[in-house]
Amino acid sequence: MLVLGIESSCDETAAAIVENGRTIVSNVISTSVAEQALYGGVVPEIASRRHAEFISATVQKAFSDAQLTPADLDAVAVTFAPGLIGAVLVGVSFAKGLAYSANKPLVGVHHLRGHIAALYLTHPDLKPPFLCLVASGGHSHIVQVEDYTRFHVLGRTVDDAAGEAFDKVARTLGLPYPGGPSVANAAKTGNPHAYRLPVPHVEGKYNVSFSGLKTAVLNAVNQAQMKGEPISVPDMAASFQERIDSILADKLLLAAQDTGAKTICLAGGVAANGRLRALLNEGAQKLGARLCLPRTALCGDNGAMIAAQGYYEYQAGNRAGLDLNGLPTLPIDYQ
Ligand code: KG4
Ligand code: ZN
């Protein structure tokens, strides 16, 4: 079964064709990230406009790379929530037009479910149930993936998402957007024990909180500036990365231990972080659990993950009508 996946919830305009939810036939990503970097973050209005400009050529390239036409598809899947609403609606409207004109079923896909499905594209034998940390620019969830379309949220951030914390700390340190890769890069030459950063207290055993950590970095930078002392960007980047990654890894491993999960996974843009991947590798080995990580190229937003999840939503009988709307927020365990 061939599914086209369309993604436009943030600053990537992406389209891909995936066979049976597991095999990528084509995968095309256009992005306005360089332009967004000029503003230090995503400007929703610019994202929407660039999606409108890029989407036809992106989808066309997904077809030409795959040497397929819309008539060959079995379904059209599209991210309908959560995300920047103006951006989401560009993908949703385009997908509807395509589904209508090609007379194909339309499937709405939850963006975070899509991030989890990137794991199916990397590990052909991975099947639910498993425990997954989904960490992106807008969300940080510890989720029990009970089945392909059934999820139970064990914990979440009570304030900033992990990716958002990376982005804000990068800005404080004068590093470019997106913050995750630039903090990770600066951290390579830094000492992770140079600055003592707090572990924020949070209610809820599997919840996380990053706003206090972000403020601690900001305070340290401000205090150094007031005293006329230099701050070492590599050392602060490394100290922050070590702290946030160990909080994320510890929470996921604690949840794995408590629930007896045999397979633990990581997904979302922050899953590209090398130190987080290494910490989870060590922890999973100690627990005797299998660790599955998405291929780095599939951690960020892409159409293949939406097509993969679209396949499983379709198999579960979830079809959207041509009145499908976009939603800025929606829990991952929606019914
Ligand atoms: O999943 P994603 O591509 O988009 C959203 O759904 O939000 O995640 C983007 C987030 C950004 O905050 C970015 O800074 C972060 O993922 N990110 C990283 C890394 N690469 C991207 N965070 C830490 N380390 C990285 N290597
Ligand atoms: Zn995402």
Image (tube, grey):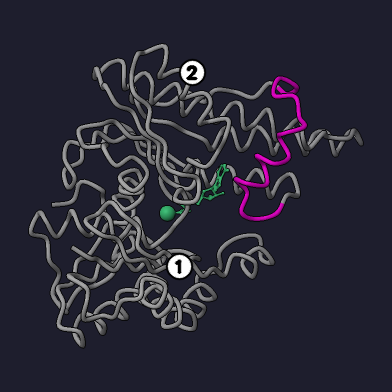
Q: Secondary structure at mark 1?
A: strand
Residue 129 percent coordinates (x, y): 20, 32
Q: Which residue is mark 1?
A: 28
Give the position of the N terminus as an image quadrant.
bottom left
Question: Which residue occupies the extreme left position in the image?
Answer: 317
The answer to whether the residue labelled 2 contacts the one labelled 1, judged by CB atoms less than 8 Å apart, is no
Position of residue 313 measured from the top left corner of the image (x, y, whole percent): 17, 56
Q: Is residue 26 left or right of residue 192?
A: left
At numbered mark 2, what does the secondary structure look like: helix, strand or loop? helix
Q: What is the three-letter code of the residue carrying label 2?
A: Glu
Is residue 323 depicted above or below 220 in this figure? Answer: below
Q: Which mark is residue 69?
A: none
Image location (x, y in percent) of residue 157? 41, 37
Q: Is residue 278 magenta?
A: no
Horizontal side of 20 relative to 228 (left or right) equals: left
- Residue drawn 46% across and 25% down? 249
Which stretch is magenta? 176-195
Q: Which of the 4 image quarters holds residue 144?
A: top left
Give the mark nearest the N terminus, 2 or 1: 1
Q: Is residue 192 magenta?
A: yes
**Marks 2 and 1, Cα distance to the nearest angstrom?**
34 Å
Q: Residues within 10 Å of mark 2 (few under 14, many from 20)?
A: few
Q: Which residue is mark 2?
A: 282
